[in-house]
Image (cartoon, helix red, strand yellow):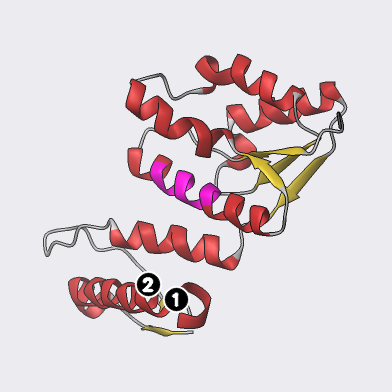
Amino acid sequence: MNTTKTLIYLATPYSHTDAEVRERRFKAVNQKAAELMRQGLHIYSPISHTHPIALAGELPLGWDYWQDYDRAMLNACCKLMVLKLDGWSESKGVLAEIKIADELGLPVEFLEPSFHTSALTAFSALNDLTFSASAPVFHTEFIRAPHPAAIGERHAKRLQEVAERVKESMGPAATSIGRI
């Protein structure tokens, strides 16, 4: 029996007061986990694996509830990878996971979000916006849709439609919109 550990723990921030932010983080880490699994790595993502369980079972979402479970999973892993989504360096859970990995002697690797993961997160954020003429004006210089080859033609078309809605809702405040 092979006892060499091959499981890699993929950490990322999750907790947030805004459910939409939690959902975007969930989608982004799923995308990164899939990318790493396509490379042949064995990935455990606490967010990917427990987010649906927490929602289905009405379980708490924060680190205080999940820390014993996550410690046990880290103990079964050979490495910790940290996906550096916004908020990672302030995340109570991610910082604790790094500390536990250090205690266990696990190497820690930091990953930048891939372009596709970043585009997916941005697309989700834009797609969730509600547009209203009475909404406060916000300043933006550029709203750009990624090239279709990077995120797929269907998503690129939808992102461009959402960007057009942003432009229309902002009127003269929209200074530039287009494709990179």
Q: Residue at x 55, y 38 (%)?
A: 13
Vertical position of residue 23 compared to residue 98: above or below: below
> Can you tell which mark lies on residue 155?
2
Q: Residue at x 41, y 75 (%)?
A: 141
> Can you tell which mark lies on residue 57?
none
Vertical position of residue 148 compared to residue 120: above or below: below
Vertical position of residue 65 compared to residue 78: above or below: above
Mark 2, other Cα within 10 Å: few <14 / some 14–19 / many ≥20: some
Q: Residue at x 18, y 62 (%)?
A: 131
Query: Magenta region: which residues?
Result: 23-30
Asked whether the viewer can see residue 142, the reply is no
Left or right side of 92 for 106: right
Q: Which SS type dominates the magenta stretch?
A: helix
Which of the 4 quarters of the picture holds residue 80? top right
Q: CA distance from mark 2 to mark 1?
A: 6 Å
Q: Amino acid at mark 1?
A: Gly
Determine whether the residue tagged by mark 1 lies in a helix, strand or loop: loop
- Asked if the residues shown at circle 2 and circle 1 are in contact, with their CB atoms under 8 angstroms apart, the answer is yes
Determine whether the residue tagged by mark 2 lies in a helix, strand or loop: helix
Q: Amino acid at mark 2?
A: His
Q: Residue at x 33, y 79 (%)?
A: 157
Asked whether the viewer can see residue 48, the reply is yes
x then y, percent, for residue 28 = 51, 52
x then y, percent, for residue 122 = 43, 62
In the rendered picture of this protein, how many numbered marks are placed on residues? 2
Q: Label 1, on which residue? A: 152
Which of the 4 quarters of the picture holds residue 17? top left
Question: Quick check: is 156 in the magenta stretch?
Answer: no
x then y, percent, for residue 119 = 48, 66
